[in-house]
Image (tube, helix red, strand yellow):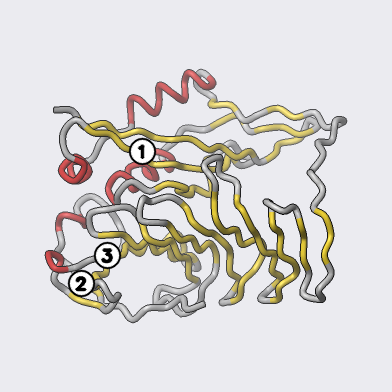
């Protein structure tokens, strides 16, 4: 799998850089670098999350995300973290994780409307451990061995409490979203009047009650996606989930809708 593209930094594209952070890169339709925004087919925003995490999101110039990559360095030479690819409609197609340039943990392919994958692979620092076909419910191993995938069974002895928005529960969260999610002007100009779209987000509430691990399973367009990420990053604290009386991580998945009037 080829992760790195030759890129060329550019500046001064105010339509993208206004009120947002990160570095921007432009590409032709063949993914060669260029400098003219009007003639570009794709662009990429690189965001420094911390000193060892650089998130790169590639977009159709006036459409959804194409791919999401994470690197250890700003020069994008060491894949390290989440990688994802999207179809032309902005739906998640495949996702996986890397550890210093090698495939690691779970890689999932071919997502259905309910968010479940059709197939998956498990890796350990670049070594394939097993393949899972959820349609046939068969697990296959590099040795050639196969076995039946057993349905996961819930532990009935566990006592679990879901994470809850600290200011009013689910109603408070809906209020926070409705009052703070803004439809960007760029999205309005691209989507056109009397239209709507959505950004599909997943995120974790960690054991401290903070929003963490923000990811998009459906991309609408660059400015709408960034607005969804901003909203989640600015979320007030939550009451964390509990498992058997101890704080636990909890994952949410929802749609954030953007509407354009006449």
Q: Residues within 10 Å of mark 2 (few under 14, many from 20)?
A: some
SS of the residue under disc 1: strand
Q: Residue at x 19, y 46 (%)?
A: 190
> Foreground mark, 2 or 1?
1
Give the x, y percent position of residue 178: 35, 25
- Answer with mark 2 or mark 1, whichever residue precedes in sequence: 2
> Foreground mark, 1 or 3?
1
Whole-angstrom CA distance, mark 1 to mark 3, is 21 Å
* Residue of label 2: 10
Left or right for 166, reference 105: left
Left or right for 245, reference 257: right
* Residue of label 3: 43
Whole-angstrom CA distance, mark 3 to mark 2, is 10 Å
The furthest residue to the right: 157
SS of the residue under disc 2: strand
Whole-angstrom CA distance, mark 2 to mark 1, is 29 Å
Give the x, y percent position of residue 4: 42, 78
């Amino acid at each position: 799998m080829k992760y790195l593209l030759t890129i060329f930094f550019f500046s001064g594209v105010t339509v993208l850089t206004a009120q947002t952070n990160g570095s921007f890169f432009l590409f032709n339709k063949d993914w060669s670098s260029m400098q003219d925004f009007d003639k570009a087919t794709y662009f990429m925003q690189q965001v420094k999350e911390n000193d060892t995490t650089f998130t790169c999101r590639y977009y159709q110039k006036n459409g959804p995300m194409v791919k999401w990559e994470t690197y250890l360095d700003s020069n994008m030479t060491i894949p390290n973290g989440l990688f994802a690819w999207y179809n032309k409609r902005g739906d998640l197609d495949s996702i996986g994780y890397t550890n210093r340039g090698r495939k690691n943990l779970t890689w999932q392919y071919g997502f259905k409307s309910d968010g479940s994958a059709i197939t998956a692979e498990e890796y350990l620092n670049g070594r394939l451990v097993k393949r899972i076909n959820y349609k046939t419910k068969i697990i296959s191993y590099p040795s050639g061995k196969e076995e039946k995938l057993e349905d996961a069974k819930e532990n009935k002895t566990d006592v679990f409490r879901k994470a809850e928005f600290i200011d009013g529960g689910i109603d408070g969260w809906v209020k926070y979203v409705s009052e703070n999610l803004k439809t960007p002007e760029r999205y309005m100009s691209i989507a056109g009047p009397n239209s709507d779209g959505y950004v599909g987000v997943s995120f974790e509430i960690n054991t401290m009650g903070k929003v963490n691990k923000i990811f998009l399973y459906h991309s609408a367009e660059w400015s709408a996606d960034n607005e969804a990420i901003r909203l989640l990053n600015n979320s007030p604290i939550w009451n964390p989930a509990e498992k058997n009386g101890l704080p636990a991580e909890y994952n949410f998945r929802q749609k954030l809708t953007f509407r354009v009037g006449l």
